[in-house]
Amino acid sequence: MSLVLVVVVGVLFGVGFHLLLQRSLIRIVVGFVLLGHGANLALLVAGGPAGAPPLLGRRGEGPMADPLPQAMALTAIVITFGVTAFLLALAYRSWLFLGEDEVQDDVEDRRIAAAEARREGYDEEDGG
Amino acid sequence: MNDVLLPLPYAVPLAGAALGLLLWRWQNALRLLGIGILAATVAAAIGVLAAVADHGVITTQVGGWPAPLGITLVADRLSALMLLVSSIVLLAILLYAVGQGVVGHSEAEPNFFYPAYLTLSAGVCLVFLTGDLFNLFVAFEVMLASSYVLLTLAPNPARMHAGMTYVVVSLTSSILFLTSVAVTYAATGTVNLADLSTRIADLPEGLRTALALMFLVVFGIKGAVAPLHLWLPDSYPAAITKITAVFAALLTKTAVYALIRTQTLLFPDGRTGTVLLVLAAATMLIGLLGALTQQDIHRVLSFALVGHIGYLVFGLALFSVAGLAGAILYLVHHIVVQATLFLVSDIMQDETGETSLERLGGLAGSSAFTAVLFFVPAMSLSGVPPLSGFVAKLALLQAGFGSGRTLGYAVAGVAVLAGLLTLIAMSRVWTLAFWRPRPPTPEPELPPEQEPGEEPGLSRPQRYSRGLVRGVTAGMVAFGLAVAVLAGPLTSWSLQAATDLLDRSAYQNAVREGSRP
């Protein structure tokens, strides 16, 4: 039971990080959503095996489940939900500006490439 | 009394942010609200500092649940000092923003600057006050979520690109943080820091090292420790400059604070010391060599910021009273000076419309006052005596050369070299922007849309008050000087704070006793 959940967490993390490394913004967003689910599930797994509902004054059969990680997972779900909404808005705004869904090249890379191109231009002038 | 006092620095800005959302139509009310709320936060921070000075570590249980389960707020000497310095800097930058009147919005849109800024302040204060790991995660999320909004205010293509980089990197580190919290809870059954510090000793050796490294990676990304720093120089310069000033002064520092807190409290044997020393040296060299190659003044300052994170990590890595005290002094110095430098660079951009060192020049003649405003913090950052940077660097170097470890000596040597590199980088900015005559024909290096830090095509609302902008920046410079003047009391306070950090018993006892009904 618990092992299945652990494997699911692992798969979610693997797929999430793979998508996060893609160039398309929407894949990055989906990757983040999967990572968030993986982390929340990891919190739940951290609470130990399932048990009776931890309600005051209503003692069920067997040991109670640990309510603390559940509370933490709920908080984390709210946070990831809010941030996902912001990320979608950001991706949409970025698409409006750039007209494409691709993440651009690194700023520094482009600067170095431009500087290099200019220097080669000078060298040719000197040679000619 | 602590039950009321300790939540105040967090609760007041958050309530102000809620009020700010209601008041978005009335600009003057928003200005007054922001200033009033942050002034109240400064007052609360002074109250916390006074209480800590009187009683030592103070705690409270929010909601009345006892310690390992409930939400614990703790203030010790380190957090009280950080709280005070941060709230003063937050207030100063808000005053600057009010004076400049440009908050990146048009009249038709709701003004999100003030609510987002106040939420960010609440998050920063909560990071310093929180006493459990999960709450630390929440505090970072509160802070970062508002920073995403602030970074992408007044959107343009460069800013959206930078915003995407920043948000995705921050989110990844947050997910890793959450996973680390989960693993910690699975291993120990608690997330309360004081409780963890005793329980974590029972864990197997390998697991403890793994946890220490997980937290190191998490706060390393958030704090831009090399080689996890690459996101910072690409994203920070793209924001509106005064927002970059807040980010540079506080966001990375909260991560360094969290790194210091977790490593000293949970892993007091200094098992990560060697790794941290190597990372500190790498961060200093990479950051400052990067600063030397940049043309855009905001990028120079951002790379210098990365380099100086290395100093903070160096102080922590020594795991000695002297090293930690040096790191605390350096935190105070760097928060103030880095914020001041970004504010001055904003004034320079305001006067010339330029941020590129290739096109700046002649500022010393046209505005001598700005020259003075730039010169003092720049020399302080480089560690020129008798400014605050010298005091802080001296404390760190003494700790390094007194550590008795070969690696400690080596990294202290790198720190001296990094100080020299800072001096070169700052002198380069000084010479190019202030002393030489302004280049006659500005030749654009790149098309303007690739130049981050500039504000192409943005309608600039009128300046609200030029005097306030200059006055606040001069005040920040004076604050930096005050750090040097008050070096004596600050050093004894940091030494005491460092002793408490390594001793841990005051922190643990305070939380244990505070949780008794």
Image (cartoon, coloured by chain):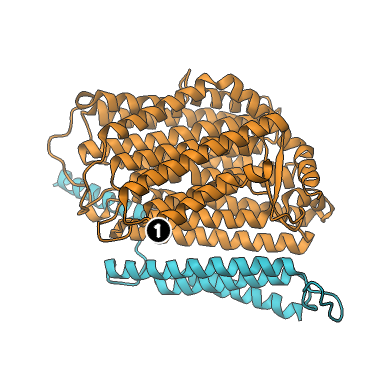
Instruction: Name the colour assigned to chain B in the rendering.
Output: orange
Chain holding disc 1: B
Residue B321 visible at all = no
- The residue nearer to you, when weighing B105 against B42, is B42
Q: Amino acid at mark 1?
A: Leu
Residue B408 placed where, x, y %?
A: 65, 32
**Image quarter for residue A68?**
bottom right
Q: Residues within 10 Å of mark 1 (few under 14, many from 20)?
A: few
Q: Among the chains, which one is cyan?
A: A
Residue position for label 1: B22
Q: Quadrant of the N terminus of chain B?
A: top right
Q: Nearer the viewer, residue B382 or A55?
A: A55
The residue that appears at 39% across and 24% down in the rendered structure is B376
Horizontal relation, residue B323 to residue B331: left or right = right
Left or right, residue B399 beside residue B485: right
Local secondary structure at mark 1: helix
Q: Nearer the viewer, residue B226 or B33?
A: B33
